[in-house]
Image (spheres, rainbow, N blue to C red):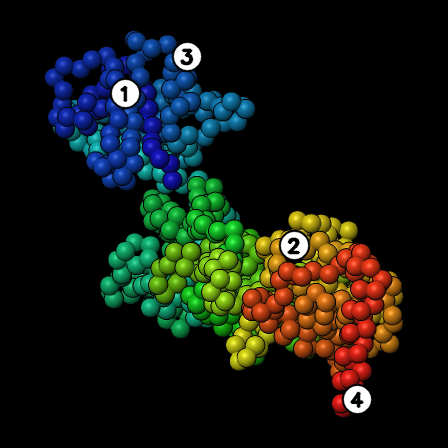
Amino acid sequence: MKKDVRILLVGEEQVGKTSLILALVSEEFPENVPSRAEEITIPADVTPEQIPTHIVDYSSFEQTPDVLDEEIFKADVICIVYDVTNPETIEKIESYWIPLVLNCNDDDGTPQNKPMILVGNKSDLSEHSTMDTLIEIMNKYSQVKTCIECSAKLVKNISEMFFYAQKSVLYPEDPLYSQETKELTEPCARALTRIFKICDLKGDRILDDEELNRFQYQCFKSPLKDEEVNDVKNCVKRNTADGLKNNGLTLTGFLFLHKLFMERGRHETTWTVLRKFGYGDDLELREDYGDAGLDIPSRSTTELSELGNDFFTRLFEKCDKDKDGALSPEELEDLFSVCPIMPWNEEVLSCIQTNENGWITYDSYIALWVLTTYLDCNRVFSWLSYFGYMHGEVERQLSTAVTVTRSKDVDLSKRQTSRKVFRCNVIGPPGAGRTTLLQGLVNRSLEEIEGRKDVAETKFTINTVDLSGQEKYLILCKITWNQVDIELLNSKKCDVICFLYDQSDPSSFSKVLEHYENVMSGVPCLFIASKSDLPAVVQDSEIQPSLYCSLNNLPAPVPFSALTKATLTKDVFKTITHLAVYPHLTGRKSQFFSTTTVLSLGFGTACLAAGAFLLYKYLRHNKT
Protein backbone atom coordinates (compact mmCIF):
# COMPACT_ATOMS: atom_id res chain seq x y z
CA MET A 1 0.00 0.00 0.00
CA LYS A 2 1.18 3.49 -0.80
CA LYS A 3 2.59 5.55 2.05
CA ASP A 4 0.76 8.71 1.05
CA VAL A 5 -1.74 9.96 -1.55
CA ARG A 6 -1.46 13.05 -3.74
CA ILE A 7 -4.79 14.43 -5.01
CA LEU A 8 -4.86 17.09 -7.76
CA LEU A 9 -7.96 19.22 -8.44
CA VAL A 10 -8.32 20.53 -12.00
CA GLY A 11 -11.15 22.07 -13.99
CA GLU A 12 -12.33 25.29 -15.56
CA GLU A 13 -11.97 28.55 -13.65
CA GLN A 14 -14.77 29.50 -11.25
CA VAL A 15 -16.08 25.94 -10.83
CA GLY A 16 -15.15 26.01 -7.13
CA LYS A 17 -11.98 23.89 -6.83
CA THR A 18 -10.44 26.13 -4.19
CA SER A 19 -13.72 26.42 -2.28
CA LEU A 20 -13.96 22.64 -2.03
CA ILE A 21 -10.46 22.40 -0.56
CA LEU A 22 -10.99 25.19 1.96
CA ALA A 23 -14.41 23.86 2.96
CA LEU A 24 -12.87 20.46 3.64
CA VAL A 25 -10.21 21.94 5.90
CA SER A 26 -12.38 24.45 7.80
CA GLU A 27 -15.65 22.49 7.59
CA GLU A 28 -17.40 25.70 6.53
CA PHE A 29 -17.81 27.70 3.35
CA PRO A 30 -15.01 30.29 3.01
CA GLU A 31 -16.13 33.90 2.69
CA ASN A 32 -12.95 35.03 0.95
CA VAL A 33 -11.67 32.61 -1.65
CA PRO A 34 -8.18 33.11 -3.16
CA SER A 35 -7.53 32.25 -6.78
CA ARG A 36 -5.63 29.12 -5.69
CA ALA A 37 -5.16 27.26 -2.40
CA GLU A 38 -1.67 26.36 -1.26
CA GLU A 39 -0.85 22.65 -1.10
CA ILE A 40 -2.45 21.11 1.98
CA THR A 41 -1.31 17.98 3.80
CA ILE A 42 -3.87 16.13 5.88
CA PRO A 43 -2.13 14.04 8.60
CA ALA A 44 -2.64 10.30 8.66
CA ASP A 45 -4.43 10.27 12.01
CA VAL A 46 -7.38 12.30 10.69
CA THR A 47 -7.92 10.35 7.45
CA PRO A 48 -10.16 7.25 7.29
CA GLU A 49 -7.36 5.08 5.88
CA GLN A 50 -4.63 6.44 8.20
CA ILE A 51 -2.59 7.62 5.21
CA PRO A 52 -1.18 11.16 4.83
CA THR A 53 -2.99 12.95 2.00
CA HIS A 54 -1.67 15.88 -0.04
CA ILE A 55 -4.27 18.02 -1.78
CA VAL A 56 -3.08 20.22 -4.65
CA ASP A 57 -5.06 23.02 -6.33
CA TYR A 58 -4.52 24.26 -9.90
CA SER A 59 -5.32 27.70 -11.31
CA SER A 60 -4.71 28.74 -14.91
CA PHE A 61 -4.56 32.36 -13.66
CA GLU A 62 -1.43 31.70 -11.60
CA GLN A 63 0.17 28.62 -13.23
CA THR A 64 1.36 27.70 -16.71
CA PRO A 65 0.39 24.63 -18.77
CA ASP A 66 3.86 23.20 -18.11
CA VAL A 67 3.22 23.39 -14.37
CA LEU A 68 -0.11 21.64 -14.92
CA ASP A 69 1.61 18.81 -16.83
CA GLU A 70 4.12 18.44 -14.00
CA GLU A 71 1.37 18.33 -11.35
CA ILE A 72 -0.59 15.71 -13.30
CA PHE A 73 2.58 13.65 -13.56
CA LYS A 74 3.17 13.80 -9.77
CA ALA A 75 -0.46 13.23 -8.75
CA ASP A 76 -1.86 9.82 -7.78
CA VAL A 77 -5.46 10.72 -8.63
CA ILE A 78 -7.07 13.57 -10.56
CA CYS A 79 -10.34 15.18 -9.47
CA ILE A 80 -11.93 16.95 -12.47
CA VAL A 81 -14.28 19.56 -11.02
CA TYR A 82 -17.19 21.04 -13.01
CA ASP A 83 -20.08 23.37 -12.27
CA VAL A 84 -23.41 21.50 -12.29
CA THR A 85 -25.13 24.71 -13.44
CA ASN A 86 -22.75 25.31 -16.34
CA PRO A 87 -23.02 22.81 -19.26
CA GLU A 88 -19.85 24.17 -20.84
CA THR A 89 -17.77 22.97 -17.89
CA ILE A 90 -19.33 19.52 -18.27
CA GLU A 91 -18.52 19.47 -21.99
CA LYS A 92 -14.86 20.37 -21.28
CA ILE A 93 -14.50 17.20 -19.13
CA GLU A 94 -14.50 14.96 -22.18
CA SER A 95 -13.18 17.40 -24.76
CA TYR A 96 -10.18 18.69 -22.79
CA TRP A 97 -9.50 17.42 -19.29
CA ILE A 98 -9.73 13.65 -19.72
CA PRO A 99 -7.53 13.66 -22.87
CA LEU A 100 -5.02 15.88 -21.06
CA VAL A 101 -4.72 13.38 -18.21
CA LEU A 102 -4.62 10.37 -20.52
CA ASN A 103 -1.74 11.87 -22.51
CA CYS A 104 0.43 12.17 -19.42
CA ASN A 105 3.17 9.53 -19.73
CA ASP A 106 5.97 8.17 -17.57
CA ASP A 107 9.56 9.08 -18.35
CA ASP A 108 9.80 6.07 -20.66
CA GLY A 109 6.69 7.12 -22.59
CA THR A 110 4.33 4.61 -20.92
CA PRO A 111 0.81 5.99 -20.22
CA GLN A 112 0.31 6.43 -16.50
CA ASN A 113 -3.37 5.41 -16.53
CA LYS A 114 -4.17 7.55 -13.49
CA PRO A 115 -7.58 7.21 -11.83
CA MET A 116 -9.97 10.15 -12.23
CA ILE A 117 -12.92 11.31 -10.15
CA LEU A 118 -15.61 13.57 -11.67
CA VAL A 119 -16.79 16.14 -9.13
CA GLY A 120 -19.85 18.31 -9.69
CA ASN A 121 -19.81 21.41 -7.46
CA LYS A 122 -22.58 23.92 -6.61
CA SER A 123 -25.27 21.24 -6.34
CA ASP A 124 -27.12 23.62 -4.01
CA LEU A 125 -27.85 25.86 -7.02
CA SER A 126 -29.45 23.17 -9.20
CA GLU A 127 -32.61 21.12 -8.92
CA HIS A 128 -31.49 18.61 -11.52
CA SER A 129 -28.77 15.99 -11.29
CA THR A 130 -26.00 15.64 -13.84
CA MET A 131 -25.35 12.00 -12.96
CA ASP A 132 -26.86 10.55 -16.15
CA THR A 133 -24.46 12.55 -18.29
CA LEU A 134 -21.53 11.69 -16.07
CA ILE A 135 -22.29 7.94 -16.09
CA GLU A 136 -22.12 7.99 -19.88
CA ILE A 137 -18.63 9.45 -19.62
CA MET A 138 -17.66 6.86 -16.97
CA ASN A 139 -18.73 4.04 -19.27
CA LYS A 140 -16.42 5.35 -22.01
CA TYR A 141 -13.31 5.68 -19.86
CA SER A 142 -12.20 2.94 -17.45
CA GLN A 143 -9.89 5.46 -15.77
CA VAL A 144 -12.93 7.39 -14.46
CA LYS A 145 -13.69 5.54 -11.24
CA THR A 146 -16.66 7.43 -9.86
CA CYS A 147 -18.61 10.68 -9.99
CA ILE A 148 -20.18 12.68 -7.20
CA GLU A 149 -22.08 15.96 -6.78
CA CYS A 150 -21.01 18.31 -3.98
CA SER A 151 -21.73 21.69 -2.52
CA ALA A 152 -18.89 23.75 -1.08
CA LYS A 153 -21.45 26.25 0.25
CA LEU A 154 -23.38 23.60 2.18
CA VAL A 155 -20.24 21.56 2.90
CA LYS A 156 -22.06 18.60 1.38
CA ASN A 157 -20.35 15.38 0.16
CA ILE A 158 -16.92 17.03 0.29
CA SER A 159 -15.25 14.57 2.66
CA GLU A 160 -16.86 11.75 0.65
CA MET A 161 -15.37 13.16 -2.53
CA PHE A 162 -11.85 13.16 -1.10
CA PHE A 163 -12.42 9.71 0.40
CA TYR A 164 -13.34 8.32 -3.02
CA ALA A 165 -10.23 9.94 -4.48
CA GLN A 166 -8.05 8.43 -1.78
CA LYS A 167 -9.74 5.06 -2.13
CA SER A 168 -9.15 4.93 -5.90
CA VAL A 169 -5.39 5.08 -5.18
CA LEU A 170 -5.16 2.84 -2.14
CA TYR A 171 -7.59 0.23 -3.46
CA PRO A 172 -7.26 0.37 -7.24
CA GLU A 173 -9.79 -1.53 -9.29
CA ASP A 174 -7.74 -2.30 -12.40
CA PRO A 175 -5.47 -5.00 -10.90
CA LEU A 176 -8.50 -6.85 -9.54
CA TYR A 177 -11.34 -6.46 -12.01
CA SER A 178 -11.81 -5.93 -15.73
CA GLN A 179 -14.57 -3.54 -16.69
CA GLU A 180 -14.50 -5.00 -20.21
CA THR A 181 -15.05 -8.65 -19.28
CA LYS A 182 -16.83 -7.95 -15.98
CA GLU A 183 -14.66 -10.63 -14.39
CA LEU A 184 -11.85 -10.83 -11.84
CA THR A 185 -8.44 -10.51 -13.44
CA GLU A 186 -6.36 -13.68 -13.73
CA PRO A 187 -3.73 -12.52 -11.15
CA CYS A 188 -6.50 -11.61 -8.71
CA ALA A 189 -8.30 -14.94 -9.15
CA ARG A 190 -4.99 -16.79 -8.74
CA ALA A 191 -4.19 -14.94 -5.50
CA LEU A 192 -7.68 -15.51 -4.08
CA THR A 193 -7.47 -19.19 -5.00
CA ARG A 194 -4.27 -19.50 -2.96
CA ILE A 195 -5.94 -17.75 -0.03
CA PHE A 196 -8.93 -20.08 -0.26
CA LYS A 197 -6.65 -23.15 -0.15
CA ILE A 198 -4.77 -21.79 2.85
CA CYS A 199 -8.00 -21.16 4.75
CA ASP A 200 -9.33 -24.60 3.86
CA LEU A 201 -7.61 -26.13 6.88
CA LYS A 202 -9.36 -29.48 6.51
CA GLY A 203 -8.41 -29.81 2.86
CA ASP A 204 -11.95 -30.75 1.76
CA ARG A 205 -12.18 -27.91 -0.79
CA ILE A 206 -14.90 -26.07 1.14
CA LEU A 207 -14.90 -23.40 3.83
CA ASP A 208 -17.25 -24.49 6.60
CA ASP A 209 -18.67 -22.02 9.10
CA GLU A 210 -15.68 -22.38 11.45
CA GLU A 211 -13.13 -21.81 8.68
CA LEU A 212 -15.15 -18.94 7.22
CA ASN A 213 -15.32 -17.21 10.58
CA ARG A 214 -11.60 -17.72 11.19
CA PHE A 215 -10.89 -16.16 7.78
CA GLN A 216 -13.21 -13.24 8.56
CA TYR A 217 -11.61 -12.59 11.93
CA GLN A 218 -8.04 -12.77 10.64
CA CYS A 219 -8.78 -10.28 7.87
CA PHE A 220 -11.21 -7.92 9.57
CA LYS A 221 -10.85 -8.67 13.31
CA SER A 222 -14.57 -9.36 13.69
CA PRO A 223 -16.39 -12.69 13.28
CA LEU A 224 -19.55 -13.03 11.21
CA LYS A 225 -22.86 -13.30 13.01
CA ASP A 226 -25.00 -16.34 12.24
CA GLU A 227 -27.47 -14.29 10.23
CA GLU A 228 -24.60 -12.74 8.27
CA VAL A 229 -23.23 -16.20 7.41
CA ASN A 230 -26.68 -17.25 6.23
CA ASP A 231 -27.04 -14.08 4.16
CA VAL A 232 -23.69 -14.77 2.46
CA LYS A 233 -24.67 -18.36 1.68
CA ASN A 234 -28.10 -17.36 0.37
CA CYS A 235 -26.52 -14.76 -1.90
CA VAL A 236 -24.08 -17.31 -3.28
CA LYS A 237 -26.82 -19.91 -3.72
CA ARG A 238 -29.01 -17.51 -5.68
CA ASN A 239 -26.23 -16.48 -8.06
CA THR A 240 -24.07 -19.59 -8.61
CA ALA A 241 -24.76 -23.20 -9.47
CA ASP A 242 -21.94 -24.72 -7.42
CA GLY A 243 -20.96 -22.00 -4.95
CA LEU A 244 -22.02 -24.13 -1.99
CA LYS A 245 -21.30 -27.75 -1.12
CA ASN A 246 -22.30 -29.57 2.07
CA ASN A 247 -23.42 -26.16 3.35
CA GLY A 248 -19.89 -24.82 2.94
CA LEU A 249 -18.44 -22.20 0.59
CA THR A 250 -16.60 -23.59 -2.45
CA LEU A 251 -13.85 -21.85 -4.39
CA THR A 252 -16.47 -20.85 -6.97
CA GLY A 253 -18.56 -19.21 -4.26
CA PHE A 254 -15.53 -17.54 -2.72
CA LEU A 255 -14.49 -15.99 -6.05
CA PHE A 256 -18.09 -14.94 -6.75
CA LEU A 257 -18.25 -12.96 -3.51
CA HIS A 258 -15.13 -11.01 -4.43
CA LYS A 259 -16.48 -10.35 -7.90
CA LEU A 260 -19.62 -9.02 -6.22
CA PHE A 261 -17.48 -6.72 -4.05
CA MET A 262 -15.93 -5.32 -7.24
CA GLU A 263 -19.31 -4.72 -8.87
CA ARG A 264 -20.53 -2.89 -5.77
CA GLY A 265 -17.41 -0.71 -5.55
CA ARG A 266 -16.11 -2.40 -2.40
CA HIS A 267 -12.58 -2.80 -3.68
CA GLU A 268 -11.19 -2.18 -0.23
CA THR A 269 -12.70 -5.46 1.02
CA THR A 270 -10.79 -7.60 -1.46
CA TRP A 271 -7.62 -5.52 -1.09
CA THR A 272 -7.77 -5.96 2.69
CA VAL A 273 -7.87 -9.73 2.22
CA LEU A 274 -5.05 -9.73 -0.33
CA ARG A 275 -2.78 -7.53 1.77
CA LYS A 276 -3.46 -9.55 4.90
CA PHE A 277 -2.12 -12.57 3.03
CA GLY A 278 1.02 -10.74 1.89
CA TYR A 279 0.16 -9.36 -1.54
CA GLY A 280 1.46 -6.04 -2.83
CA ASP A 281 -0.11 -3.70 -5.35
CA ASP A 282 1.26 -5.86 -8.19
CA LEU A 283 -0.57 -8.91 -6.77
CA GLU A 284 2.72 -10.64 -6.04
CA LEU A 285 3.79 -11.59 -2.55
CA ARG A 286 5.76 -8.73 -1.02
CA GLU A 287 9.47 -9.28 -0.49
CA ASP A 288 9.16 -8.44 3.20
CA TYR A 289 6.31 -10.93 3.68
CA GLY A 290 8.69 -13.90 3.88
CA ASP A 291 11.35 -12.04 5.88
CA ALA A 292 11.47 -13.16 9.49
CA GLY A 293 14.36 -10.83 10.38
CA LEU A 294 16.18 -13.67 12.13
CA ASP A 295 19.75 -13.08 13.28
CA ILE A 296 21.89 -16.23 13.05
CA PRO A 297 25.34 -16.17 14.71
CA SER A 298 28.15 -17.71 12.67
CA ARG A 299 28.64 -20.67 15.02
CA SER A 300 24.93 -21.47 15.35
CA THR A 301 22.66 -23.49 13.11
CA THR A 302 18.96 -23.43 12.32
CA GLU A 303 16.48 -26.24 12.92
CA LEU A 304 12.73 -26.65 12.62
CA SER A 305 11.03 -25.72 15.86
CA GLU A 306 8.22 -27.78 17.33
CA LEU A 307 5.73 -25.25 15.92
CA GLY A 308 7.32 -25.47 12.49
CA ASN A 309 7.30 -29.26 12.61
CA ASP A 310 3.63 -29.29 13.66
CA PHE A 311 2.70 -26.93 10.82
CA PHE A 312 4.39 -29.03 8.15
CA THR A 313 2.80 -32.14 9.70
CA ARG A 314 -0.70 -30.67 9.39
CA LEU A 315 0.10 -29.65 5.83
CA PHE A 316 1.14 -33.22 5.02
CA GLU A 317 -2.00 -34.66 6.59
CA LYS A 318 -4.13 -32.17 4.67
CA CYS A 319 -2.62 -33.20 1.31
CA ASP A 320 -2.35 -36.95 1.98
CA LYS A 321 -5.88 -37.57 0.73
CA ASP A 322 -5.70 -41.38 0.75
CA LYS A 323 -4.00 -41.44 4.16
CA ASP A 324 -1.30 -43.90 3.04
CA GLY A 325 1.50 -41.97 4.73
CA ALA A 326 3.08 -40.83 1.45
CA LEU A 327 2.54 -38.10 -1.13
CA SER A 328 1.73 -39.28 -4.63
CA PRO A 329 2.73 -37.00 -7.53
CA GLU A 330 -0.81 -35.61 -7.60
CA GLU A 331 -0.81 -34.98 -3.85
CA LEU A 332 2.64 -33.37 -4.10
CA GLU A 333 1.36 -31.08 -6.84
CA ASP A 334 -1.60 -30.16 -4.63
CA LEU A 335 0.79 -29.37 -1.75
CA PHE A 336 2.68 -26.80 -3.82
CA SER A 337 -0.36 -25.44 -5.67
CA VAL A 338 -0.27 -22.37 -3.40
CA CYS A 339 3.35 -21.69 -4.39
CA PRO A 340 4.71 -20.00 -7.54
CA ILE A 341 6.80 -23.03 -8.55
CA MET A 342 7.17 -26.75 -7.84
CA PRO A 343 10.53 -26.89 -6.00
CA TRP A 344 10.87 -30.65 -5.44
CA ASN A 345 12.17 -32.28 -8.60
CA GLU A 346 13.82 -35.68 -9.20
CA GLU A 347 17.15 -34.46 -7.82
CA VAL A 348 15.51 -33.34 -4.58
CA LEU A 349 13.82 -36.73 -4.22
CA SER A 350 17.28 -38.32 -4.40
CA CYS A 351 18.15 -36.55 -1.13
CA ILE A 352 15.74 -38.65 0.90
CA GLN A 353 14.46 -42.16 1.35
CA THR A 354 11.29 -42.85 -0.65
CA ASN A 355 8.81 -45.73 -0.61
CA GLU A 356 8.58 -48.53 -3.17
CA ASN A 357 6.69 -46.22 -5.55
CA GLY A 358 9.35 -43.52 -5.33
CA TRP A 359 6.97 -41.30 -3.32
CA ILE A 360 7.85 -39.07 -0.37
CA THR A 361 6.90 -40.62 2.96
CA TYR A 362 6.01 -38.51 5.98
CA ASP A 363 9.43 -39.01 7.60
CA SER A 364 11.24 -38.05 4.41
CA TYR A 365 8.94 -35.07 3.88
CA ILE A 366 9.88 -33.70 7.30
CA ALA A 367 13.54 -34.52 6.61
CA LEU A 368 13.46 -32.37 3.47
CA TRP A 369 12.16 -29.40 5.44
CA VAL A 370 14.79 -30.06 8.12
CA LEU A 371 17.48 -30.05 5.41
CA THR A 372 16.18 -26.82 3.85
CA THR A 373 15.96 -25.15 7.26
CA TYR A 374 19.55 -26.11 8.04
CA LEU A 375 20.94 -24.95 4.70
CA ASP A 376 18.85 -21.80 4.15
CA CYS A 377 16.23 -20.85 6.71
CA ASN A 378 15.27 -17.74 4.72
CA ARG A 379 14.14 -20.03 1.93
CA VAL A 380 12.00 -21.93 4.42
CA PHE A 381 10.46 -18.66 5.55
CA SER A 382 9.51 -17.97 1.93
CA TRP A 383 7.80 -21.35 1.60
CA LEU A 384 6.09 -20.91 4.96
CA SER A 385 4.69 -17.58 3.78
CA TYR A 386 3.38 -19.26 0.61
CA PHE A 387 1.77 -22.01 2.67
CA GLY A 388 0.12 -19.49 5.01
CA TYR A 389 1.99 -20.27 8.22
CA MET A 390 0.87 -16.93 9.67
CA HIS A 391 -2.80 -17.64 8.94
CA GLY A 392 -3.50 -20.99 10.55
CA GLU A 393 -5.55 -21.74 13.61
CA VAL A 394 -3.39 -19.26 15.53
CA GLU A 395 -1.60 -16.28 14.00
CA ARG A 396 2.16 -16.63 14.41
CA GLN A 397 5.32 -14.86 13.40
CA LEU A 398 7.46 -16.65 10.82
CA SER A 399 10.43 -16.80 13.17
CA THR A 400 8.56 -19.15 15.53
CA ALA A 401 8.88 -21.94 12.95
CA VAL A 402 12.67 -22.06 13.35
CA THR A 403 15.01 -22.58 16.28
CA VAL A 404 18.45 -20.99 16.30
CA THR A 405 20.78 -23.30 18.19
CA ARG A 406 23.35 -22.07 20.63
CA SER A 407 26.94 -21.68 19.52
CA LYS A 408 28.92 -24.87 18.85
CA ASP A 409 31.67 -23.41 21.03
CA VAL A 410 29.29 -23.44 24.00
CA ASP A 411 28.29 -27.03 23.22
CA LEU A 412 31.95 -28.03 23.20
CA SER A 413 32.71 -26.30 26.47
CA LYS A 414 29.68 -27.84 28.18
CA ARG A 415 30.26 -31.19 26.46
CA GLN A 416 26.61 -31.57 25.54
CA THR A 417 24.24 -30.30 22.89
CA SER A 418 20.50 -29.97 22.33
CA ARG A 419 20.95 -29.92 18.55
CA LYS A 420 19.14 -32.50 16.45
CA VAL A 421 20.68 -31.85 13.03
CA PHE A 422 24.32 -32.56 12.14
CA ARG A 423 26.33 -32.21 8.94
CA CYS A 424 29.13 -34.38 7.64
CA ASN A 425 31.27 -33.35 4.65
CA VAL A 426 32.28 -36.34 2.53
CA ILE A 427 35.65 -36.03 0.76
CA GLY A 428 37.10 -38.63 -1.57
CA PRO A 429 38.69 -39.01 -5.00
CA PRO A 430 36.61 -39.93 -8.07
CA GLY A 431 35.62 -43.57 -7.96
CA ALA A 432 35.91 -43.86 -4.18
CA GLY A 433 32.14 -44.07 -3.80
CA ARG A 434 30.99 -40.69 -2.47
CA THR A 435 27.63 -40.93 -4.28
CA THR A 436 27.19 -44.50 -3.03
CA LEU A 437 27.83 -43.42 0.57
CA LEU A 438 25.34 -40.57 0.30
CA GLN A 439 22.69 -42.82 -1.20
CA GLY A 440 23.42 -45.50 1.38
CA LEU A 441 22.22 -43.06 4.03
CA VAL A 442 18.79 -43.08 2.35
CA ASN A 443 18.85 -46.89 2.00
CA ARG A 444 19.72 -47.16 -1.70
CA SER A 445 22.23 -49.73 -2.89
CA LEU A 446 24.65 -49.46 -5.79
CA GLU A 447 22.46 -51.63 -7.99
CA GLU A 448 19.56 -49.21 -7.43
CA ILE A 449 21.44 -46.03 -8.26
CA GLU A 450 23.61 -47.07 -11.22
CA GLY A 451 22.81 -45.03 -14.30
CA ARG A 452 20.65 -42.47 -12.46
CA LYS A 453 21.87 -38.98 -13.33
CA ASP A 454 19.70 -37.29 -10.67
CA VAL A 455 21.41 -39.39 -7.98
CA ALA A 456 24.89 -38.65 -9.31
CA GLU A 457 24.24 -34.91 -9.17
CA THR A 458 22.81 -34.91 -5.66
CA LYS A 459 25.00 -32.94 -3.27
CA PHE A 460 23.11 -33.66 -0.04
CA THR A 461 21.24 -36.55 1.53
CA ILE A 462 19.49 -36.61 4.88
CA ASN A 463 17.98 -39.26 7.12
CA THR A 464 17.34 -39.96 10.75
CA VAL A 465 19.79 -41.98 12.83
CA ASP A 466 18.86 -43.57 16.13
CA LEU A 467 21.53 -42.81 18.69
CA SER A 468 20.96 -44.35 22.12
CA GLY A 469 17.21 -44.08 21.67
CA GLN A 470 17.34 -40.48 20.44
CA GLU A 471 16.50 -39.54 16.85
CA LYS A 472 19.07 -37.30 15.18
CA TYR A 473 19.17 -36.00 11.62
CA LEU A 474 22.37 -36.66 9.71
CA ILE A 475 23.14 -34.62 6.59
CA LEU A 476 25.84 -35.92 4.24
CA CYS A 477 27.38 -33.34 1.90
CA LYS A 478 29.40 -34.51 -1.11
CA ILE A 479 32.41 -32.26 -1.67
CA THR A 480 33.67 -31.92 -5.22
CA TRP A 481 37.16 -33.40 -5.36
CA ASN A 482 38.78 -30.59 -7.35
CA GLN A 483 37.26 -27.98 -5.04
CA VAL A 484 38.70 -29.19 -1.73
CA ASP A 485 40.72 -26.40 -0.16
CA ILE A 486 42.04 -25.30 3.22
CA GLU A 487 39.04 -23.10 3.93
CA LEU A 488 36.59 -25.91 3.26
CA LEU A 489 38.53 -28.42 5.32
CA ASN A 490 38.54 -26.08 8.29
CA SER A 491 34.97 -24.86 7.86
CA LYS A 492 33.01 -24.43 11.02
CA LYS A 493 29.84 -25.17 9.08
CA CYS A 494 30.22 -28.95 9.40
CA ASP A 495 30.35 -31.28 12.42
CA VAL A 496 32.33 -34.20 10.94
CA ILE A 497 34.60 -34.72 7.92
CA CYS A 498 34.62 -38.18 6.36
CA PHE A 499 37.61 -39.10 4.21
CA LEU A 500 36.50 -41.83 1.86
CA TYR A 501 39.02 -44.08 0.17
CA ASP A 502 38.64 -47.18 -1.99
CA GLN A 503 40.26 -50.06 -0.08
CA SER A 504 40.64 -52.02 -3.35
CA ASP A 505 42.62 -49.18 -4.97
CA PRO A 506 46.24 -48.92 -3.70
CA SER A 507 46.52 -45.21 -4.54
CA SER A 508 43.26 -44.11 -2.91
CA PHE A 509 44.30 -43.65 0.74
CA SER A 510 47.32 -41.46 -0.01
CA LYS A 511 45.10 -39.10 -2.01
CA VAL A 512 42.71 -38.38 0.85
CA LEU A 513 45.60 -38.30 3.33
CA GLU A 514 46.99 -35.23 1.63
CA HIS A 515 43.76 -33.40 2.36
CA TYR A 516 43.37 -34.74 5.90
CA GLU A 517 46.75 -33.35 6.90
CA ASN A 518 45.44 -29.85 6.14
CA VAL A 519 42.69 -30.16 8.75
CA MET A 520 43.57 -27.92 11.69
CA SER A 521 40.21 -26.85 13.10
CA GLY A 522 39.65 -29.80 15.41
CA VAL A 523 36.58 -30.96 13.51
CA PRO A 524 36.13 -34.71 14.18
CA CYS A 525 37.40 -36.79 11.26
CA LEU A 526 36.69 -40.34 10.15
CA PHE A 527 38.30 -42.49 7.49
CA ILE A 528 35.90 -44.78 5.62
CA ALA A 529 37.16 -47.77 3.64
CA SER A 530 34.64 -48.08 0.81
CA LYS A 531 33.96 -51.15 -1.34
CA SER A 532 34.54 -53.45 1.61
CA ASP A 533 32.88 -56.20 -0.42
CA LEU A 534 36.10 -56.32 -2.46
CA PRO A 535 39.49 -57.62 -1.20
CA ALA A 536 41.56 -54.94 0.58
CA VAL A 537 44.97 -54.18 -0.91
CA VAL A 538 48.10 -52.65 0.58
CA GLN A 539 47.92 -48.89 0.17
CA ASP A 540 50.71 -46.95 -1.52
CA SER A 541 51.41 -45.00 1.67
CA GLU A 542 54.28 -44.96 4.17
CA ILE A 543 51.75 -45.88 6.86
CA GLN A 544 48.73 -48.12 6.36
CA PRO A 545 45.28 -46.70 7.28
CA SER A 546 44.80 -48.58 10.59
CA LEU A 547 48.21 -47.67 11.96
CA TYR A 548 47.87 -44.09 10.77
CA CYS A 549 44.56 -43.71 12.62
CA SER A 550 46.00 -45.30 15.75
CA LEU A 551 49.01 -43.01 15.79
CA ASN A 552 46.80 -39.96 15.33
CA ASN A 553 44.21 -40.88 17.96
CA LEU A 554 41.53 -41.36 15.32
CA PRO A 555 38.80 -43.99 15.12
CA ALA A 556 39.84 -47.00 13.11
CA PRO A 557 38.78 -46.85 9.43
CA VAL A 558 35.17 -47.95 9.07
CA PRO A 559 34.36 -50.40 6.27
CA PHE A 560 31.48 -49.56 3.96
CA SER A 561 29.72 -51.45 1.20
CA ALA A 562 26.51 -50.71 -0.63
CA LEU A 563 26.75 -53.25 -3.43
CA THR A 564 23.29 -54.63 -2.68
CA LYS A 565 20.58 -53.96 -0.16
CA ALA A 566 21.71 -57.04 1.76
CA THR A 567 25.32 -55.81 2.03
CA LEU A 568 24.47 -52.15 2.73
CA THR A 569 26.54 -51.08 5.74
CA LYS A 570 24.52 -48.87 8.09
CA ASP A 571 26.69 -48.83 11.22
CA VAL A 572 28.92 -46.23 9.59
CA PHE A 573 26.14 -43.65 9.86
CA LYS A 574 25.80 -44.23 13.60
CA THR A 575 29.56 -43.78 13.92
CA ILE A 576 29.42 -40.49 12.03
CA THR A 577 26.49 -39.25 14.10
CA HIS A 578 28.20 -40.25 17.35
CA LEU A 579 31.29 -38.22 16.38
CA ALA A 580 29.07 -35.23 15.56
CA VAL A 581 27.07 -35.36 18.79
CA TYR A 582 30.10 -36.03 21.04
CA PRO A 583 33.03 -34.18 19.42
CA HIS A 584 34.75 -33.76 22.79
CA LEU A 585 35.33 -37.54 22.91
CA THR A 586 37.28 -37.39 19.68
CA GLY A 587 41.05 -36.99 19.40
CA ARG A 588 42.07 -33.36 18.85
CA LYS A 589 45.26 -34.11 16.89
CA SER A 590 47.40 -32.70 19.68
CA GLN A 591 50.05 -35.37 18.86
CA PHE A 592 49.64 -35.39 15.12
CA PHE A 593 51.80 -37.84 13.14
CA SER A 594 51.93 -37.11 9.44
CA THR A 595 53.66 -39.36 6.94
CA THR A 596 56.43 -36.76 6.70
CA THR A 597 56.79 -36.70 10.49
CA VAL A 598 57.22 -40.46 10.66
CA LEU A 599 60.00 -40.38 8.06
CA SER A 600 61.77 -37.52 9.83
CA LEU A 601 61.89 -39.47 13.08
CA GLY A 602 64.59 -41.58 11.55
CA PHE A 603 64.60 -45.17 10.45
CA GLY A 604 65.15 -46.64 13.92
CA THR A 605 62.41 -44.65 15.59
CA ALA A 606 59.95 -45.47 12.85
CA CYS A 607 60.80 -49.17 13.10
CA LEU A 608 60.37 -49.01 16.87
CA ALA A 609 56.90 -47.53 16.51
CA ALA A 610 55.91 -50.09 13.89
CA GLY A 611 57.51 -52.96 15.84
CA ALA A 612 55.65 -52.06 19.01
CA PHE A 613 52.40 -52.11 17.13
CA LEU A 614 53.16 -55.53 15.51
CA LEU A 615 54.24 -56.94 18.90
CA TYR A 616 50.96 -55.81 20.38
CA LYS A 617 49.03 -57.61 17.63
CA TYR A 618 51.14 -60.76 18.06
CA LEU A 619 50.58 -60.94 21.82
CA ARG A 620 46.90 -60.31 21.43
CA HIS A 621 46.66 -63.10 18.82
CA ASN A 622 48.42 -65.60 21.09
CA LYS A 623 46.14 -64.76 23.99
CA THR A 624 43.16 -65.72 21.92
Residue 427 visible? The answer is no
The residue labelled by disc 4 is 622
Which image quadrant: the C terminus?
A: bottom right
Dividing the picture into quarters, in which one does residue 153 lie? top left
Residue 66, which numbered label?
3
Query: Which element is circle 1 on?
Result: loop
According to the picture, the residue beneath numbered tag 2 turns out to be: 520
Query: Image point 64% across, 60% down: which residue?
Result: 590
Q: Is residue 551 above or below residue 135?
A: below
**Relative to residue 50, is residue 347 drawn left or right?**
right
Considering every residue shown, the one lying at the far front of the view is 604
Q: Residue at x 42, y 56 (%)?
A: 399
Q: Nearer the viewer, residue 69 or 375?
A: 375
- What mark, if any, has residue 39 been given in the picture? 1
Going by the numbered disc 4, the residue's amino acid type is Asn
Q: How many marks?
A: 4
